[in-house]
Image: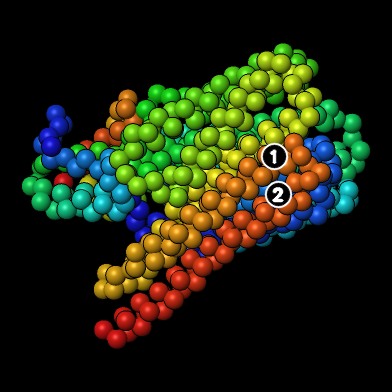
Amino acid sequence: MTHPKTPHVVDARYMEPPAPFVKTMEMLDILQEGEKMLLLLFREPHPLYKVLRQNGHDYEVELMPDGTFEILISR
Amino acid sequence: MMSFESAPPFAAPLRFFLTAPLFALLAGLLVAIEGPDIFASRWMPASLAVTHLLTVGFMLQIMLGALIQILPVVAGASLTRPLLVATIVHLGLTLGTLLLAAGFYFGRPDLLSAAAVLLALTILVFLSAALTVLLSIPSTSPTIRGLKLALFSLAVVVGLGVLMALAMAYGWALPFPALADLHAAWGFGGWAGILLAAMAYVVVPMFQLTPGYPARPSWWFPVGMLALLLLWSGAVLAGWPAGIRISQLLAAILGLAFVGLTLRLQGKRRRARADVTYRYWQLGLAASIFALLMLLTVALWPAVAEYNGWTLIFGILLIAGGFLPFIVGMLYKIVPFLAWLHLQNEGQAKVPAPNVSKILPNVDMQRQMNAYAGTLVLLLVAALQPEWLSRPAGLCFALVSGWLWLNLFGAIQRYRQHKQEILAKLAAL
């Protein structure tokens, strides 16, 4: 799956915990320097945010009209 | 999605979850002991005691315990000292509930005022702990905004409750019926209703694999409900009955819209098997529709409230039919999940945690839920035939509440056994 914001997308909207967390971490591992990934979820993943901040990743969040949170994470 | 570092110790929420069903059990026993008298009016001492055993003893107990656990997950707001807050709030709430119920039941002004002071202080401790972290966080999601507005409503509910309890104790003249309705409106619509919506935005898609709640209605539901409650309060203060009815009508419509939206999302769920949480929510949603339709009807034709059993049936549908099933449905997800999460952590990625169904078997929850649904029907029929059925209905309610406690306690026992096994395996590595 690709997206206008980035080709690296984890669509975790119909996944049960902890799959969204695990898939995001796996995707971050394979990203190249300067690349970004997009996580799609129907909620804000605050525990993930905390891990991202601890590991020095920047992220931007946008809430779409259908209730999807688009979380754009820099490597 | 949940990481361990942000989770408070298991003991913090557990004490609330294991205490709450005992208050529901007590409420059922009180109905069984009092019999038909309790069904005569919402103003009977025993009715007031039962109502508060359920709302403060069961609902508030679980809501606050769950919030201590879940604030870091849904809002990124970790309480500074969760275990200390849990200890104080649990103790204050438990003693406060007992004093309050005893104060109503035995008609003791001294107990009522002691309960009012204790509960007010307890909620103050909780609110200051929660708001300290929550207010510094921007409302980036409808859930965070909802949580803030729900906590504001909690302050109003408790404020009104304390005012009425002290007025009863000291004989102050107050317009009790209008204030009691307002107290209930802030409690069910503002505190429990907005909190439920704020949690539903997260847990319905997460646990039931449904689409998300659309952004626009999610932002506006909590604000709309709060605005209606402010209108209702203003109408009570100004002595404007039409304003009260307009707020009731609009609050009922808003509630129905939320329930309808949730049902639509559930209809699109991607989990093929309907689990106990889903079924408990369906029960809650169905009963809420009837309760809200009754609220809508009484706003349009206030005279129907005079109909024998009307207020009682409304109360049963709203509390035992609506909110309790939502709460129990969530407990049945949260308790095994937390146990699993803590076992996962104990295993240090070397020893795997057992599946959640090993911690709380599905069949145990399913049977308790079937019994609960049957009890709800019995309670509703008892409201029409209190002479014959009020005592059996109360007894059944006590039994299903005890069953809930046994299920949760069993889960904790199995969690402890697994923990010992994991520690033994780790030591042997």
In the figure, B381 relative to B106: above or below? above
Q: CA distance from mark 2 to mark 1?
A: 9 Å
Q: Amino acid at mark 1?
A: Val
Circle 1 Cα neighbour tier, 10 Å, few/some/many (<14 / 14–19 / ≥20): some
- Residue B427: quarter of image: bottom left
Query: Whole-percent x and y of residue B357?
Result: 39, 62
Residue at 41% over, 74% down: B419
Q: Residue furthest front?
A: B388
In the figure, B16 relative to B45: above or below? below
Q: Nearer the viewer, residue A35 or B26?
A: B26
Q: Earlier in the sequence, mark 2 or mark 1?
A: 1
Q: Amino acid at mark 2?
A: Ala
- Residue B359: quarter of image: bottom left
The quadrant of the image that shows the N terminus of chain A is top left
Query: Whole-percent x and y of residue B281?
Result: 48, 42
Check contact, mark 2 vs mark 1: CB within 8 A. yes
Q: Residue furthest left?
A: A32
Residue at 69% over, 21% down: B298
Q: Nearer the viewer, residue A6 or B328?
A: B328
Number of marks drawn: 2
Helix, strand or loop under label 2: helix
Q: Chain of mark 1?
A: B
